[in-house]
Image (cartoon, coloured by chain):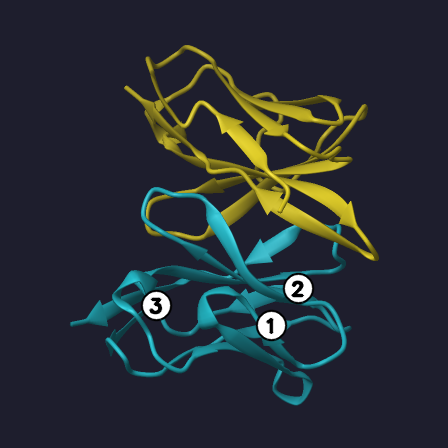
Chain colours: A cyan, B yellow
């Protein structure tokens, strides 16, 4: 069965510092991978997704993620965080682009002024 | 991007009553819709997959008779929480799949905060 692991429950970084949120997946074939962001009490916003092709994916708001098959990872990065990036971040996986999406447990990002 | 609208955004109901949540794809036809549930400070848990014109497929542990899902048209799916209890209080989010070029993407509604008192 497919699963997603986000090992960091809560991360705090200083504004302007770089960020990396970890995500590992468990699935036999190449999965469809997603990163979503959720502000308190709000719905989900898709940051980026990987279906195939270039393993370095660019998303919105200056985020990027790299698919590493050998490590079963899809870590999210941003070179310089802004206070507005404080939110909950979810990594997710799917069998196909149309099937159900399985979410990781989430990582809460706090920004230190 | 495609828009998915959920209504209501917040609802408070009394124990024992039923509540209906609507999920609409506003500018596309969604053959498949998904319903998720999110407890405070937790992740989204898939409840069921809903295909237009057929019965929903529920995830293990989700009570079919408690959470009634209807997907009567390509733009509307509804989730009815029957005989609601305080433990049903949660954040419910729907998503709808949309075929775009060679890929199918899922778009999420803004969620419904249900509080049962």
Looking at this view, is A31 or B18 the one in front? A31
Residue at the limit of the structure toward the bottom, as seen here: A70
Q: If you read the primary sequence from the N terminus, does the residue marked by circle 2 or circle 1 appear first?
A: 2
Q: If you read the primary sequence from the N terminus, does the residue marked by circle 2 or circle 3 appear first?
A: 2
* Chain label for disc 1: A
Q: If you read the primary sequence from the N terminus, does the residue marked by circle 1 or circle 3 appear first?
A: 3
Mark 3: which secondary structure? loop
- Asked if labels 1 and 2 touch by Cβ distance under 8 angstroms, the answer is yes
Marks 2 and 1, how far apart in space? 7 Å
Q: Residue at x 44, y 22 (%)?
A: B8
**In the image: residue A4, left or right of residue B91:** right
- Asked if labels 3 and 2 touch by Cβ distance under 8 angstroms, the answer is no
Percent x, y of residue B96? 66, 39
Q: Residue at x 66, y 24 (%)?
A: B76
Circle number at residue B117? none
> What residue is pinned by disc 2?
A2
Mark 2: which secondary structure? loop
Q: Are marks 2 and 3 on the same chain?
A: yes
Q: Are marks 2 and 1 on the same chain?
A: yes
Mark 1 is surrounded, within 10 Å at the Cα level, by few (under 14), some (14 to 19) or many (20 or more) other residues, namely many
Q: Is residue A93 above or below residue B88?
A: below
* Chain label for disc 2: A
Which quadrant of the figure has residue B13? top left
Marks 2 and 3, how far apart in space? 20 Å
Mark 2 is surrounded, within 10 Å at the Cα level, by few (under 14), some (14 to 19) or many (20 or more) other residues, namely some
Q: Residue at x 61, y 45 (%)?
A: B107
Circle number at residue A9? 3
Q: Nearer the viewer, mark 2 or mark 3?
A: 3
> What residue is pinned by disc 1?
A25
Percent x, y of residue B49? 69, 38
Mark 1: which secondary structure? strand
Marks 1 and 3, how far apart in space? 16 Å
């Amino acid at each position: 069965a497919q699963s997603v692991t986000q090992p960091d429950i809560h991360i705090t970084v200083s504004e302007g510092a770089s960020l990396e949120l970890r995500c590992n997946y468990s699935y036999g074939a190449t999965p469809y991978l997603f990163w979503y962001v959720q502000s308190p009490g709000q719905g989900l916003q898709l940051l980026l997704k990987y279906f195939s092709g270039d393993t370095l994916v660019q998303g919105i708001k200056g985020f990027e993620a790299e698919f590493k098959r050998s490590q079963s990872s899809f870590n999210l990065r941003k070179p310089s965080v802004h206070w507005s990036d404080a939110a909950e971040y979810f990594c997710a996986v799917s069998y196909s682009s149309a099937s159900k999406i399985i979410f990781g447990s989430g990582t809460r990002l706090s920004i230190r002024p | 991007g495609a828009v998915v609208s959920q209504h209501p955004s917040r609802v408070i109901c009394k124990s024992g009553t039923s509540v209906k949540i609507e999920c609409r794809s506003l500018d596309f036809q969604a053959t498949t819709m998904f319903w998720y549930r999110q407890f405070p400070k937790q992740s989204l848990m898939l409840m069921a997959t809903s295909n237009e014109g057929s019965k929903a497929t529920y995830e293990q542990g989700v009570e079919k008779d408690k959470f009634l899902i209807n997907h009567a048209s390509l733009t509307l799916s509804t989730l009815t929480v029957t005989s609601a209890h305080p433990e049903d209080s949660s954040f419910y989010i729907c998503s709808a799949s949309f075929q775009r070029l060679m890929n199918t993407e899922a778009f999420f509604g803004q969620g419904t905060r249900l509080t049962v008192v």
